[in-house]
Amino acid sequence: MRTIAPILLLAMLSTACSGGGNEETVKPLQESAQREPTELVFASELGKTPEDFEKEIAEPLRKKFPWLTLKYIERGKGNDIADLVTAGTTPDIYWYVYNRFPNKIQSLGLEYDMSDLIKKYNFDMKRLDQASLQSLDQYTGGKGVYGFPFVASTSVMYYNKDIFDKFGVSYPTNGMTWDEVYNLARQLTRSADGVNYRGLATFHGYLLRENPYGLKPIDPSKEKASVNTEEWKKLFQNLVRIYQIPGNNRDTKTRATNIELQAFAKDQNIAMAVMNNDLNHVKLIPEGMNWDVVSMPTFADKPKIADQPSPWMYSIMSTSKHKDAAFEVLSYLVSDEFFMMESKRGVRTPTTNEQIKKAFGSDSPLLKGKNVGAYYYYPSAPPPALSGNAKISSLIGDGDTVVNNKFLDIVIDGKDINTALREADEEINKRIEESKKN
């Protein structure tokens, strides 16, 4: 494992690179006509149909690399990455949401540091959003480059124009604070014509996990939980008050984490919904619904900054026999050329290229006429620079689950915040101690 710190590594790479975000991202070592036919296998923990893989990934790659044969292992029973390792069919390239890295890759010994390939191929790291690129540092101690981000997920606020029109309330705008949005939610939570309207819904698990303060439920350096603090209490209070508006609580008959994602589009009685910007969430909104989008709310003491990124990552598996070919492929999948195509169809990419950002959603019928500038209105908050025991870091995801469950204890079961935070620390510390025995 390399021990070059990310900032130093980036500086070295910047010096070595020719620069210019519009140039080719990577130059192959040989012309295509000279290349040996090679098969690369893709797999993922994220659902994508073979048809979508063919259209969105395989077809563009074959045009660029005609010497490649591409195989895709679709997510399903028996196709988890651990199953593939056991069966001896580990893919060359795996994609995933960044927080799955410790359990899906590290725990299986599949992590691979691309630093040498980055230098070998003169890859320009400055083209990628640094907050997204550094999202794995909390699991690796900031040593090496173990994945490239290709989707930069962040939060925005969708709103139903018809509800605002019905009650004569002005639409929300870019740049609002949580306090302003909370006051809007109070105005719009009411009953009319036999319908109970909710002012605001949130993807609360995501907002807690990717908070703009960089708070994490575990401090790996101290090997202890870090939830029972005033900072976490502030985060909880901000979201809890929303669900304590009379008539605005989420469905209390279920503890499902995705229920708020669906309610805005399905029930159409919710005025505003702060959700992450996944294109699949937009696809849930039915045709004919009168909606638009603005930037996510911000805290008064954290102005002009979004939440931490929750990027989707590509990683080369350590077991791959075709690492150079895999790196060339990944370099293209995060190139300006490919990012521009993705941006036009409504995928928020981790680019630093302003032209790519401006093109966001321009080819998407779903986003036609929408306030697409909201998706890049704020820069992402940097992830925390955690260091310490890697085994303890791998429990951060478990800590996130505990945090969300404690939030549900408050809004569904009526538990008070102080008790919930104390219990969160206790449960997380118990898991940490158990991990040390194994």
Image (spheres, rainbow, N blue to C red):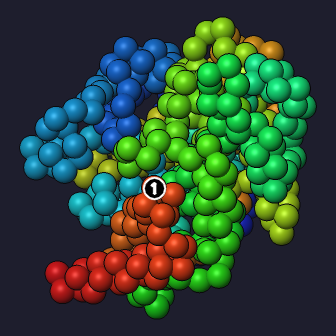
Q: Position of residue 407 (x, y in %)?
A: 49, 62
Question: Compared to 416, does 317 lie above or below?
Answer: above
Question: Compared to 386, does 352 lie above or below?
Answer: above
Q: Residue at x 41, y 87 (%)?
A: 223
Question: Compared to 99, does 226 lie above or below?
Answer: below
Outermost residue to the bottom: 222
Is any part of residue 60 visible from this angle? Answer: yes
Q: Quadrant of residue 16?
A: bottom right
Judge from the rendering whether residue 420 lies leftward or rightward of residue 12; answer left or right.
left
Q: Residue at x 81, y 49 (%)?
A: 183
Outermost residue to the left: 87
Q: Position of residue 34 (x, y in %)?
A: 41, 26
Label 1 crowd bin: few (<14), some (14–19), many (20+), radius 10 Å? some
Q: Position of residue 151 (x, y in %)?
A: 57, 39
Which residue was labeled with disc 1?
412
Is any part of residue 93 visible from this angle? Answer: no
Look at the numbered disc 1 and give the secondary structure of its residue.
helix
Q: Quadrant of residue 66?
A: top left
Between 336 and 198, which is closer to the camera in this rendering?
Answer: 198
Between 240 and 368, which is closer to the camera in this rendering?
Answer: 240
Judge from the rendering whether residue 34 lies leftward or rightward of residue 353; answer left or right.
left
Kindly identify the amino acid type of the residue bearing the numbered disc 1: Ile
Q: Residue at x 80, y 41 (%)?
A: 187
The image quadrant where one finds the C terminus is bottom left
